[in-house]
Amino acid sequence: MKKMLSKKEIKIVLEKLEGKFPDAKAELDFTNSFELLIATILSAQCTDVQVNKTTSVLFEELKTPQDYIKLSEEELGKRIRSCGFYKTKSKNILETCRLLIENYGGEVPNTMEDLVTLPGVGRKTANVVLSNAFNTPAIAVDTHVFRVSNRIGLANSTNVLDTEKDLMDNIEREMWSKAHHLLIFHGRRICKARKPLCTICPITDYCFYYKKEVKQ
Ligand code: SF4
């Protein structure tokens, strides 16, 4: 049996995190599902702040998949260079735009099954798009959600897919998207990777990591 907090305790943990981060929400800037898809592809290995800087210029110029495919990989690469891994991202974005035009009438599809057929779109990116652009309950497990969930005891797993499953099992469906944002905010601001700031954390009473590694 997996060692995790009870559903009741998990609910309290999320309430406490909501108290700490009442404004937890997506930090990528976008105005429609297509912009969110592009921004999320760009956000791999890059900060949301940097992605927002890049897209504030990019989205002024390029608004549809048709706009993008007029560019070569090199031309798009120059525009997204500051997000890192720009060659791969440029290639993936152009291929994604081609597939959106060919298979989905130029629109972003709204199912996991379809989204993951797009290059550069894995399960995490698809969940971000489903949750934030289509209001479909989803828990995208990024590096912060993975680390924080397993530290606290919301999940007990060594991989992102099982962590997502644990979270979906343990959290009410209507809270999935909110929980995703809360865990990212908590991971970025308090439960940091190298040095979690346990002294200012509101959930020490519940956290497995704290009880095992910090409290002596
Ligand atoms: S007590 Fe420490 S390890 Fe646990 S969630 Fe809070 S910051 Fe993270």
Image (cartoon, rainbow, N blue to C red):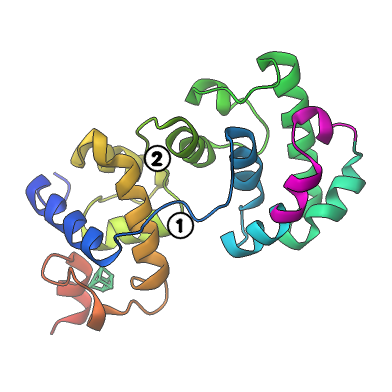
In-image side of 114 versus 88 (left or right): left
* Front tag of 2 and 1: 1
Task: Find out whether residue 16 is within the magenta segment.
Answer: no
> x, y percentage for residue 98?
78, 25
Q: Nearer the viewer, residue 92 or 55?
A: 55
Tell me which secondary structure the magenta stretch mostly adopts. Answer: helix
Amino acid type indicated by mark 1: Thr
Residue 35: quarter of image: top right
Residue 122: quarter of image: top right
In-image side of 21 versus 211 (left or right): right
In-image side of 166 versus 115 (left or right): left
In-image side of 151 versus 106 (left or right): left
- Is label 1 in a helix, a strand or a loop? helix
Task: Find out whether residue 64 is within the magenta segment.
Answer: yes
Observer able to see residue 92: yes
- Of callouts 2 and 1, which one flags the residue occurring earlier in the amino acid sequence? 1
Residue under numbered circle 2: 161
Question: Dividing the image into 4 quarters, which one contains the C terminus?
Answer: bottom left
Asked if residue 181 is positioned above or below residue 109 in the image, the reply reads below
Question: Dividing the image into 4 quarters, which one contains the N terminus?
Answer: top left
Asked if residue 54 is positioned above or below residue 167 in the image, the reply reads below
The disc placed on residue 143 is 1
Q: Specify start and end residues of the magenta stretch as a single range.
A: 56-70
> x, y percentage for residue 172?
20, 37
Q: Is mark 2 within 8 Å of ligand 1?
A: no
- Residue at image position (23%, 74%) is 201
Residue 82: quarter of image: bottom right
Amino acid type indicated by mark 2: Leu
